[in-house]
Image: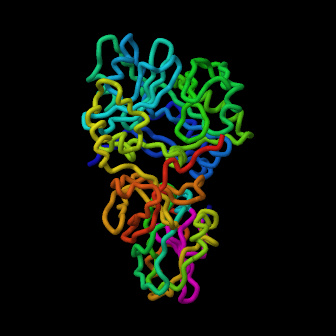
């Protein structure tokens, strides 16, 4: 007999039901995968704006005088050099250089907010606690704090009337503490769609008010509620890694092409030696972009061949409305195959289909 | 959407329209709605002999690959070539422009293994 897994609900669960979302289990929560149509929601974000409930992502509040110097030892990117109200992408690795999780640090007034993937929430909480240092205090807000993302070219225009922060002065990867609809919020210019946009951290009890306020005030401007299905297509087009796909405990940030986030000049952090050795040897399989020639979609796990020999496997794949409706994919490929312009084959249900290696990202917004 | 009364249905959410010894086959409105945006359809080759309830292709949505089964046995006479460029026709018009393939029926008695519209209605909303 199997025991039913009880899924957690975000503060916006009832709102998703009212708007007809299709709910699926994701990272231990019951989350909307789509409302109307993944492709329609994708287009809303590229052309206007979309609203996402990301409250399944774990929010850890880090306090104490030593947070920054402590975090330096656990992550590959710089932490201490962050300016007040700056946000920074960062990765926690294991000793082999594989990724525990990719995260964002937000340096707030007198504390730090660390946002980790929902699927890694428990693992990361244990990892932080196991490595905790003097003058570092950890607070787990997972599931209590809500996170609402407003993403798309019209985000600033839509959000400005409802916040007490001048959004025209809020730079990409910076945040501010203020209010949205009069409720306390951390307002960050971050996102995971390849568009301009904001992420709003609010208390769970205020989430529905902010969510419904934005949707009713901007429905006429084309704002649409969006599910995780659209988010995955948007992030893949934008060449952003998804933990469990392009980054895993086995796939390192170097393999994922995230060298820009690796501060090798930091004297010591978990995974440093393995990552530097991997970079120097330069023989590792690496994440590459693929565009399928035909109409059959490439999917996770499909084998890839180069010159008739196995060369790796697909890690993510989707139809890409912003890449001319082509089928795009990421694949972990041998070095010799992972060269832009190389012709490879993806095996789909026993038949090999032609694809071309391309540079990431597939899609870049025009400013 | 109610199921058209003049069709037969399979438990795997295909519909069949029988016209003499020819059957036209598609997936139901319930199936297309459950799948979401359909982006690719892989159908059997014309001339292929297929067996009732056999796996003969796939229907892919943005998120998932779903197996396609044939509700009747016989020879594939025609596939809907328009779906190659416009798979979303299956979403827009599952009982019309979104038909999938046509079969020359081998065994008319197989119909007893299929469901009426009202019987299908019961399983589609479980």
* Relative to A69, residue B38 above or below: below
A191 left or right of A77? right
Residue A179, image x, y percentages: 62, 19
Q: Which residue is the extreme one toward the front?
A: A280
Across the whole image, how many numbered discs are drawn on residues?
0
> Can you say whether B17 is above or below B58 in the image?
below
In this orientation, does residue B120 appear? no
Residue under the point 45% across and 79% down: B112
Image quadrant assignment for residue B3:
bottom right
Does A249 sit left or right of A246 as displayed?
A: left
Please give the name of the residue rendered at 45% of the width and 67% of the height, measured from the top-left corner.
A354
Q: In this view of the protein, which residue sits in the foreground, A238 or A58? A: A238
Classify A297 as above or below A22: below
Q: Nearer the viewer, residue A154 or A365?
A: A365
State left or right for residue A362 relative to residue A111.
right
Quarter of the image for residue A244 reads top left
Task: Find the magenta span and give its range.
Answer: B3-29
Which residue is drawn at the image coordinates 48% and 43% (left, top)? A240
Q: Quadrant of residue A51?
A: top right
Is residue A277 something that shows in the picture?
A: yes
Point out residue A5 in the picture as x, y percentages from the top left corner: 35, 41
User: Which quarter shows the N terminus of chain B?
Assistant: bottom right
Residue at x 33% of width, y 37% of height: A99
Reply yes or no: does residue B7 show up in magenta: yes
Please provide percent x and percent y for residue A61: 42, 20
Which one is nearer the viewer's eye here, B89 or B1? Answer: B89
| Residue B37 colored in magenta in the image | no
Taking A17 as reference, is B36 above or below it? Answer: below
Residue A108 position, x and y percent, is 50, 17
């Amino acid at each position: 007999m199997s025991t039913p897994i009880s899924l957690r609900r975000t503060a916006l669960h009832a709102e998703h039901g009212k708007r007809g979302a299709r709910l699926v289990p994701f990272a231990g929560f019951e989350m909307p995968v789509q409302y109307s149509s993944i492709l329609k929601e994708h287009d809303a974000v590229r052309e206007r704006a979309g609203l996402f409930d990301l409250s399944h992502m774990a929010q850890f509040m880090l306090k104490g005088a030593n947070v920054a110097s402590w975090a330096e030892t656990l992550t590959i990117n710089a932490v201490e050099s962050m300016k007040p109200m700056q946000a920074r992408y960062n990765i926690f690795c294991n000793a082999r250089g594989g990724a525990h999780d990719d995260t964002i640090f937000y340096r707030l007034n007198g504390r730090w907010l660390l946002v980790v993937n929902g699927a890694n929430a428990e693992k990361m909480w244990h990892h932080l606690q196991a490595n905790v240092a003097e003058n570092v205090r950890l607070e787990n807000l997972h599931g209590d704090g809500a996170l609402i993302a407003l993403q798309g070219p019209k985000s600033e225009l839509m959000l400005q009337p409802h916040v007490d922060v001048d959004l025209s002065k809020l730079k990409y990867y910076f945040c501010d503490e203020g209010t949205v609809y009069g409720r306390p919020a951390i307002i960050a210019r971050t996102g995971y769609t390849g568009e301009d946009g904001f992420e709003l951290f609010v208390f769970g009890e205020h989430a529905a008010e902010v969510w419904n306020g934005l949707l009713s005030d901007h429905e006429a401007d084309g704002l649409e509620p969006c599910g995780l299905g659209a988010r995955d297509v948007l992030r893949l087009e934008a060449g952003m890694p998804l933990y469990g796909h392009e980054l895993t405990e086995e796939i390192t940030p170097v393999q994922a092409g995230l060298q820009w986030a690796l501060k090798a000049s930091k004297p010591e952090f978990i995974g440093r030696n393995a990552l530097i050795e991997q970079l120097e040897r330069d023989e590792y399989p690496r994440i590459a972009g693929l565009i399928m020639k035909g109409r059959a979609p490439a999917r996770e796990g499909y084998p890839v061949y180069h010159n008739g020999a196995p060369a790796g496997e697909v890690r993510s794949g989707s139809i890409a409305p912003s890449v001319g409706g082509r089928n795009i994919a990421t694949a972990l490929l041998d070095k010799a195959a992972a060269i832009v312009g190389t012709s490879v084959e993806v095996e789909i249900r026993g038949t090999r289909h032609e694809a071309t290696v391309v540079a990431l990202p597939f899609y870049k917004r025009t400013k | 959407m109610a199921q058209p009364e003049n069709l037969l249905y399979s438990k795997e959410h295909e519909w069949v329209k029988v016209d003499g010894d020819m059957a036209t086959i598609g997936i139901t409105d319930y199936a297309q709605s459950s799948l979401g945006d359909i982006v690719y359809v892989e159908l059997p080759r014309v001339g292929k002999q297929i067996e009732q309830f056999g796996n003969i292709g796939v229907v892919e949505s943005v998120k998932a690959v779903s197996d396609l089964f044939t509700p009747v046995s016989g020879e594939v006479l025609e596939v809907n070539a328009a779906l190659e460029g416009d798979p979303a026709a299956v979403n827009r018009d599952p009982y019309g422009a979104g038909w999938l393939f046509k079969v020359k029926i081998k065994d008319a008695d197989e119909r007893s293994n299929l469901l009426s519209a009202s019987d299908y209605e019961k399983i589609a909303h479980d």
